Image (tube, helix red, strand yellow):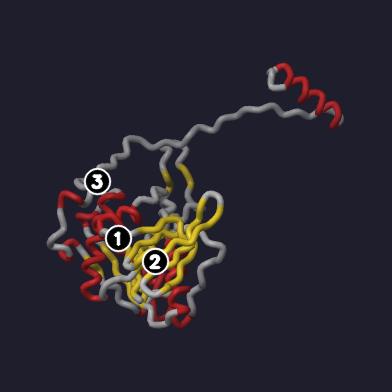
C-alpha cells in the first residue's frame, strides 16, 4: 500500500502571546511544531503499516525552507520518504490556492513514488483552524473523502474508516484511492526512535519549487489565486462582570444570592 500524509509546520499556540499595543501575535521566540492533527494522520498511517509491512509512507509539506524540520520529524517517527513544496510564487496562498498547489504536487510526486492508495491529512491546522485544505484537495483530485476519522484499516481495495460523530462513531467503507482527514483519537502518536532520528537527520529532502510545475495555472496560486482576504484582526476586549457574594456565613450568602436573583427577575 502507498500512503501520502500531508503535514504542516505551525507555531506552538501554547507559547503564543499577544502584543497589548498592536494587538498582533508575537512570533519572535515562538517554537514551530508538527501540526498535532497531522501527527494523528501520520500515526494512523503507521498503524496500517504495522499490520501491512509492505506499506510505504510518503510525507509532503508546503512551506518555507525551515519546514524541512517537520518533514525530518515525520521521517524519524514513521515516514519513508519526504518532499517539500516551496516557492516564492506560492507565498500568500489561502486554503483554496494551497489545496490546488498541493494537489498538483501530489501528481508530480506520484511520477516518482507511484500512485497513492490513500492520502491522509489532519482535519485542520491549529494556526488557521479552517479544516478546508483536505476536503478541497479531494475535490481537486476527484477522490472520495471521509472527514473526522479516528482510525482506519485496510480490507482489500476498501479502507474501513472509523469516523467521529456528534453522538458516537460510525464505520465507513471507502474505496481506494481516497482522502481521509483525521481528528484526535483515543491514542497518542508514537515517539521517534534513535535509529530513525539519526537516519532522518542525514536524509536529503527533495524540494519542489516554482519550476517543478510547468503546467500549473499562475492565476490560481499565491495572492492572485486567493479569494480570501483578511480585512482586520483584533483581540476581543476582556469584559468584567458578575457579583461576588461573601457574607459572614454560607446561609447569609445564600440569602443574599436569592435576594439578588429575585430582584433581577431570574427566579
Q: Residues within 10 Å of mark 3 (few under 14, many from 20)?
A: some
Residues under labels 1 and 2: Cα distance? 26 Å
x and y, in percent, of residue 183 in the image = 47, 57
Q: In this orientation, which residue lies closer to the viewer: 43 or 74?
A: 43
Q: In this orientation, which residue lies closer to the viewer: 53 or 102?
A: 53
Element under disc 3: loop
Identify the residue shown where x is 42% and y is 45%.
Answer: 25
Identify the residue shown where x is 79% and y is 23%.
Answer: 256
Q: In this orientation, which residue lies closer to the viewer: 108 or 193?
A: 108
x and y, in percent, of residue 62 in the image = 30, 60
Identify the residue shown where x is 25% and y is 51%.
Answer: 97
Report the residue marked by disc 2: 70
Task: Return the disc, 3 or 2, that comes first in the chain's sequence.
Answer: 2
Return the mark for residue 104: none
The answer to whether one can see residue 26 in this image is yes
Report the residue marked by disc 3: 226
Element under disc 1: loop
Task: Return the disc, 3 or 1, that comes first in the chain's sequence.
Answer: 1
Return the mark for residue 143: 1
Compared across the picture, whether 139 is left or right of 173 comes to left
Amino acid at each position: 500500500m502507498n500512503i501520502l500524509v500531508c503535514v504542516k509546520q505551525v507555531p506552538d499556540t501554547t507559547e503564543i502571546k499577544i502584543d497589548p499595543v498592536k494587538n498582533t501575535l508575537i512570533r519572535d521566540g515562538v517554537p514551530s511544531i508538527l501540526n498535532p492533527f497531522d501527527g494523528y494522520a501520520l500515526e494512523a498511517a503507521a498503524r496500517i503499516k504495522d499490520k501491512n509491512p509492505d506499506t510505504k509512507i510518503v510525507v509532503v509539506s508546503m512551506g518555507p525552507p525551515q519546514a524541512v524540520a517537520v518533514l525530518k520529524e515525520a521521517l524519524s517517527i514513521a515516514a519513508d520518504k519526504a518532499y517539500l513544496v516551496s516557492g516564492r510564487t506560492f507565498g500568500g496562498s489561502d486554503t483554496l490556492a494551497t489545496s490546488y498547489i498541493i494537489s498538483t504536487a501530489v501528481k508530480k510526486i506520484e511520477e516518482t513514488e507511484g500512485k497513492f492508495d490513500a492520502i491522509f491529512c489532519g482535519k485542520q491546522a491549529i494556526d488557521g483552524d479552517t479544516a478546508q485544505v483536505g476536503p478541497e484537495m479531494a475535490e481537486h483530485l476527484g477522490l472520495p473523502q471521509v472527514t473526522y476519522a479516528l482510525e482506519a484499516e485496510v480490507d482489500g481495495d476498501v479502507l474501513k474508516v472509523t469516523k467521529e460523530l456528534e453522538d458516537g462513531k460510525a464505520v465507513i467503507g471507502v474505496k481506494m484511492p481516497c482522502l481521509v482527514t483525521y481528528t484526535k483519537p483515543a491514542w497518542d502518536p508514537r515517539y521517534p526512535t534513535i535509529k530513525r532520528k539519526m537516519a532522518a537527520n542525514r536524509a536529503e529532502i527533495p524540494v519542489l519549487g516554482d519550476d517543478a510545475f510547468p503546467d500549473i495555472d499562475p492565476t490560481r496560486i499565491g495572492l492572485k489565486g486567493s479569494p480570501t482576504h483578511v480585512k482586520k484582526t483584533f483581540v476581543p476586549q476582556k469584559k468584567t462582570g458578575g457579583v461576588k457574594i461573601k457574607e459572614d456565613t454560607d446561609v447569609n450568602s445564600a440569602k443574599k444570592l436569592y435576594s439578588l436573583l429575585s430582584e433581577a427577575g431570574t427566579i
